[in-house]
Image: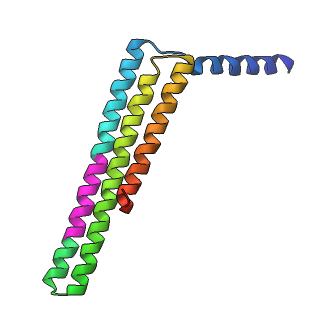
Amino acid sequence: MKVNVLWIVAAAGLALVGCNKAESPAEVQHDVTDARADAQRDVADAQADARENMADAQKDVADAQADHDPKDVADQAQQASETGAKNDYKVAVAQAEATHKIAAEKCEAVSGDAQRDCKDRADRDLEAAKRAAEQRRDGSG
């Protein structure tokens, strides 16, 4: 039993030591390339969803216009505007997360405190980008 505890403690210690260890340049490049590909797909998906949502909203406006209902036209136009703002937010967040994913992978090229600082900076940049997107969405930016 005592031996098992020592093995667990040793394994945990080794895991912690490896957390801030720099990867080889080839590993970093491979990971960055994968992150870029994932990021491009994520942003493209968000943009496609936004286009689809906006097309639906514009169709609703057109339908209201065809029905000659001014109140419904105004309501649908307002909803389309809100849909546009939500879509812009979702795309901006997807772009920010994509940038973050790539930046975090690049941080693997350094070790120790420099790696931690790099990842912290990437996290701060992500949060700032999300806040800016929220402000634009909410009309206060």
Q: Position of residue 92 (x, y in %)?
A: 34, 48
Q: Is residue 120 above or below residue 63?
A: above
Identify the residue at image location x=41%, y=35%. Answer: 100
- At horizontal 23% and vertical 67% (from top left) the residue drawn is 56
User: What is the span of residues highlighted in magenta in the rendered image?
Assistant: 45-58
Q: Is residue 78 above or below residue 118?
A: below
Is 110 located above or below residue 93 in the figure? above
Instruction: Determine the residue located farthest toward the right in the rendered image.
Output: 2
Of the 4 image quadrants, the one containing the N terminus is top right
| Horizontal arrangement in the rendering, residue 124 relative to residue 59 (left or right) | right
What residue sits 32% from the left and 31% below the top?
Answer: 36
Tell me which corner region of the image, top left, top right, bottom left or bottom right, holds residue 140.
Answer: bottom left
Residue 74, percent from left and from top: 24, 80
Q: Residue at x 36, y 59 (%)?
A: 137
Direction from residue 10 to residue 78 in the image, left or right = left
- In this orientation, which residue lies closer to the viewer: 47 or 85? 85
The residue closer to the viewer here, 69 or 113, is 113
- Farthest residue to the left: give it: 66
Q: Is residue 59 magenta?
A: no
Quadrant in the picture for residue 50: bottom left
The C terminus - image quarter: bottom left
Q: Nearer the viewer, residue 130 or 34?
A: 130
